[in-house]
Every structure is written in structure tokens, then in C-alpha cells.
Amino acid sequence: MLQRPIWSLSEIGPTKVMTVNSPVIDQPRVPGDVAEKSSIPIESGASTPQGPSLVIEPPRGWTSLNLAELWRYRDLLSLLIWRDISSRYRQSVIGYGWAVLKPVLTMVIFTVIFGRVAKIPSDGAPWALFCFVALVPWMYFAGSVSSVTTSVVQSSQFLTKVYFPRLVLPLSSAAVGLMEIGRASCRERV
């Protein structure tokens, strides 16, 4: 028994040309289209396919950020942020305490080495606060640059399966660092 295809060429409609940043545009079929340039030999006497085709072209020049598209995928962004945060601290004994403990221990080490041993002046400010104010942004910057550069490679399985804005991956990696800064800063004030 022959099965009828889910769709046929006559049901699709006219040829559509689509680029990444533009809507689908109906265009009439012209001679020399993609289907006619095919390397597949056509039997003599057989007509060339006159049905519709879908041509996807990349955008030309510099592309914009397309913030509207990022807004549509905000749920994916929040899901990736939560996934990264929970996977980073899931297997550790201290758990989310590492977000607080890492800058505090670094601050203590810097205070002992530079404040007590090297006796570098801090212009009257307490050395612990002096170090902490500088270390938190630096630790965020260093961690974000490190994680953002590898985020696309680490999530390559998503890139080949589903379409979403590629900017979501580096943004989620940078946002995880912001969450850690917020947690570390709030714990230090208390």
C-alpha cells in the first residue's frame, strides 16, 4: 500500500526566499533558480520541476543583536542560567557556599600577604574591605571571560539540534557570574 506524503509540492505555494533577519518573502519562480542548477541529471523529455522551493540565505554585512529575538527566548536563557548554577555547585560539600567562600578566602590571603607582610598602604581603609572591593569585580571579569569563551563549544549539542539565538549561550555564562557576585556581596555585608 502506497502512503501519501505528508505534503506535496502543489500544497506549499510559491517559492519563498528567507534570510535570518527578514521575514519570508513570496517571489515568483525565475529561470536559473536553485532547483534548475542542480547537479542531478534530468532525463531527456522530462520537464524541470516547477514547484516551490525554499532558499535560506545568510544576512549580508554586520548583523544587529536582535534584542526582540533574545526577549522571545528569555525562558531558555533563564533555564540555562539555572542549569549552570546548579551543576556548578551540585557535587560539592559546601554547595552554594563556594560563591561566598572563594572571594572571602582570596580577600583573607591578599590581606595577610599585602597588608601585613608587604605593608602596602590602603589610604586609611581597612585592608579587608580594600581587597574585597577590588577582588569581586576582577573575579567576575576573569571568570566570565573564561566561561563565555568556552560556552559555545560546551553547548555544541544544542546548536546542531534546535534553532535559538546563539547569543543566549554566552549571556547565560556571564549571568551565572553576576549571580555569584550578588550572592558573595550580600553575604559579606551581613
Image (tube, grey):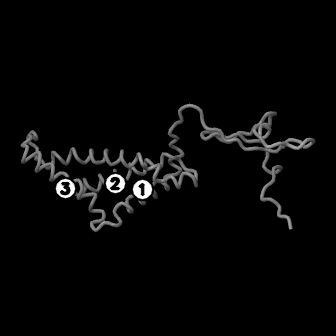
- Secondary structure at badge 3 equals helix
User: Residue at (27%, 66%) from the top-left corner?
Assistant: 94
Residue holding disc 1 = 81
User: Where residue 42 appears, x then y in whole percent?
Assistant: 85, 43
What number is the disc on residue 179?
2
Q: Amino acid at mark 2?
A: Met
Q: As displayed, is residue 40 above or below residue 60?
A: below
Most extreme residue toward the top is 61
Between marks 2 and 3 in the image, the one whose residue lies nearer the viewer:
3
Q: Which badge, 2 or 1, comes first in the chain's sequence? A: 1
On screen, residue 175 versus residue 162, left or right, reads left
Q: Which badge, 3 or 1, comes first in the chain's sequence? A: 1
Quadrant housing the C terminus = bottom left
Most extreme residue toward the right is 45
Residue holding disc 3 = 105
Q: Are marks 2 and 1 in contact (CB under 8 Å)?
A: yes
User: Residue at (15%, 52%) from the top-left corner?
Assistant: 109
Pick whichever, 19 or 31, lies toward us. Answer: 31
Q: Residues within 10 Å of mark 1 (few under 14, many from 20)?
A: many
Spatial CA span between label 2 and label 1: 9 Å
| Residue 60 picture quarter | top right
Spatial CA span between label 3 and label 1: 25 Å
| Residue 101 picture quarter | bottom left
- Secondary structure at badge 1 equals helix
Q: Amino acid at mark 3?
A: Leu
User: Residue at (34%, 50%) from the top-left corner?
Assistant: 178
